[in-house]
Amino acid sequence: MTISYQRPRRRLKNLAVGATAASLLASALMVPAQAAPAESAASSARSVEVSAQQTQGLPGQYQMAYSQKNDKLWVTGSSGRPPIETATIARVNPSTMKIEANAAMPTLRTGTGQNAGYQYNGAYGIAADDANNTVWVTNTRSSAVSVFDQTTLKQIWTSYDPAASEQVVDHPREVKMTTPLAAPSSPTGRASSPST
């Protein structure tokens, strides 16, 4: 049986690492100091002013659309895994980014028996229809599309039918305007495009 003793090697290795570090430090200290260059009359300073303003957003903000006719931003917001606890459509001034008004989102009955309750009809996708002065919104979790008046923010139409066993649009994420039609997206391909 052979037993080797490794301690001297470790000491030698530590000594080599220490010597290398000491020589690097010594060489850094031996660099002659140089005088700072004198400022010339030709050098100029650049001054930049920056300001930022933080504004309150919407809980669960999803998408935005712009109404060129009314010069307004439209923002959807929904939060909460079912049940949806907050939901809104906000009209925003694009110059100040201040919320001017919020639409009252309707509530829907959900579940049955012991699981029965209510939730907001959450707003997710959005598109501005300036030709009809409306805003189209996808209500993804209730498999519906709704239309709101841009001036009053009142809901004027929805595809949601509480009596239907299956909604006309299946889980729409966004909506695109091709006036006079609205085209909601659907991951299953089942969607209607009612004319405005």
Image: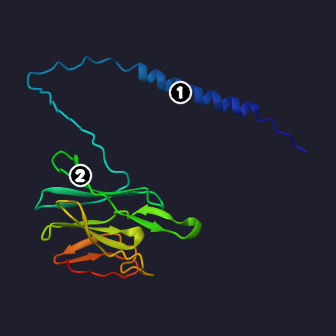
Residue 120 found in image quarter: bottom left
Q: Position of residue 51 (x, y in %)?
A: 21, 35
Which residue does the image show at 61% across and 30% down from the upper left?
16
Residue 151 is left or right of residue 138, and the answer is: left
Element type at mark 1? helix
Element type at mark 2? strand
Residue 149's place in the image compared with 59, above or below, is below
Structural distance between the alpha carbons of marks 2 and 1: 66 Å
The quarter of the picture where the N terminus appears is: top right
Disc number for residue 101: 2
Closer to the N terminus: mark 2 or mark 1?
1
Residue 34 found in image quarter: top left
Residue 18 is left or right of residue 76, and the answer is: right
The quarter of the picture where the C terminus appears is: bottom left
Q: Position of residue 92 (x, y in %)?
A: 21, 52
- The residue pinned by badge 1 equals 21
Residue 147 found in image quarter: bottom left
Looking at the rendered image, the disc whose residue lies closer to the viewer, 2 or 1, is 2
**Cβ atoms under marks 2 and 1 closer than 8 Å:** no
